[in-house]
Amino acid sequence: MDELLHRVRTRLAIRAHRKVRGLLDGEYVSLFHGKSLDFDDLRAYIPGDDVKDIDWKATARVGSPLTKRYIATKKHAVLLVVDTGRDFAALAEGGTLKRDVAILAAGVIGYLAVRHGDHVGLVAGDADSTEYVPLRGTESHLERLLRVIHKRTSLSAGPSSLAAQLDYVRRTFRRRMLVIVLADDGAIAADRDEELQLVRRLYAQHEILWITIGDADPTLEDYADRDMIDVADGRELPPFLRRDSALRNEFATAVATRTAASAELLDRIGISSRRMSSDDDVVPGLFRLLEVHNHARR
């Protein structure tokens, strides 16, 4: 029943040292530090209460110490937003399918959330349709989310449209959530006004972390003997073009420029981001993403 989640747990165990997994776990918990308690009421101070909880203004009004009482917000909401258009059926930079890198990243984040009693939901889709899987907090539910990503992402899927998924989130959710966006290379750029406006609106309402899955370079020698097609239109990429060294250099330069520009755009908005190229990048990449994000919030 939990085939995909089992793969996630196995890779997490194999690729992450126990100390790294502990640090990753700690950085996840830190995301909600200071947000897990809601104010309830005031009561008289009792010796042993934390002095930081004393309401000094109310104390001054009544003439005796009053302490703030809180109630725990036990369930946090983590929403995975995944582009499952045909672009995600292509190869990632490291040679595995982008879909599989995305499933691993979504699975690790979801696994951390479920372990801490939080609820995880999914918005996934392409230009033709969007699917929402409601927030739940069980491993069987997380398996279902991962299966949706796997099933929807294929060469027969509709064209990729991250904007459609972001707009669905904007229109549907009012409660503040942690939104994890898993996007294709180049999904956000200075000339994509629609995406930029949506991202800015969502950032004002939710906490956002952005994960980009890097494109494979079809000009690499590793692919010289393989048939390569453009997933956007199904056309074959001619071998003579893929063997052109000048084209290879131009491709590498274009990727580096685009990656830096996207990261700068997101940073300017206030969103922490990380680009991942393969399965090997996922655990250390998520750790760095959470670490940088938590540091920026302090």
Image (cartoon, rainbow, N blue to C red):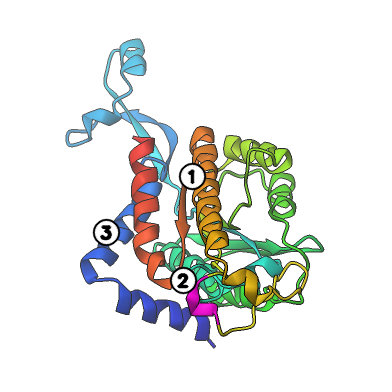
As drawn, the label of residue 23 is 3
Measured as percent of width and height from the top left, residue 116 is found at 39, 62
Q: Are marks 2 and 3 in contact (CB under 8 Å)?
A: no
Tag 2: Cα neighbours inside 10 Å, few (<14), some, or many (≥20)? some
Measured as percent of width and height from the top left, residue 261 is found at 53, 42
Tag 1: Cα neighbours inside 10 Å, few (<14), some, or many (≥20)? few
Badge 2 amino acid = Gly
Badge 3 amino acid = Leu
Residue extending farthest to the right is 128
Tag 3: Cα neighbours inside 10 Å, few (<14), some, or many (≥20)? some
- Tell which of 96 and 53 is nearer to you: 96
Q: Is 223 a magenta residue?
A: yes
Q: Is the magenta stretch mostly helix, strand or loop?
A: helix
Q: Quadrant of the C terminus?
A: top left
**Rendered residue at 66%/39% (across/down):** 196
Closer to the eye: label 3 or 1: 1
Residue marked by disc 2 = 94
Q: Dot 2: what SS?
A: loop
Residues at marks 3 and 1, CA–CA distance in whole angstroms: 27 Å
Please give left or right for residue 120 compared with residue 197 in the image.
left
Let me know if residue 33 appears in the view.
no
Let me know if residue 261 appears in the view.
yes
Residue marked by disc 1 = 260
Q: Is 278 a magenta residue?
A: no
Tell me the quarter of the picture where residue 33 sits.
top left
Residues at marks 2 and 1, CA–CA distance in whole angstroms: 19 Å
Residue span colored magenta: 220-224
Q: Dot 1: what SS?
A: helix
Residue extending farthest to the left is 47
Measured as percent of width and height from the top left, residue 100 is found at 53, 75
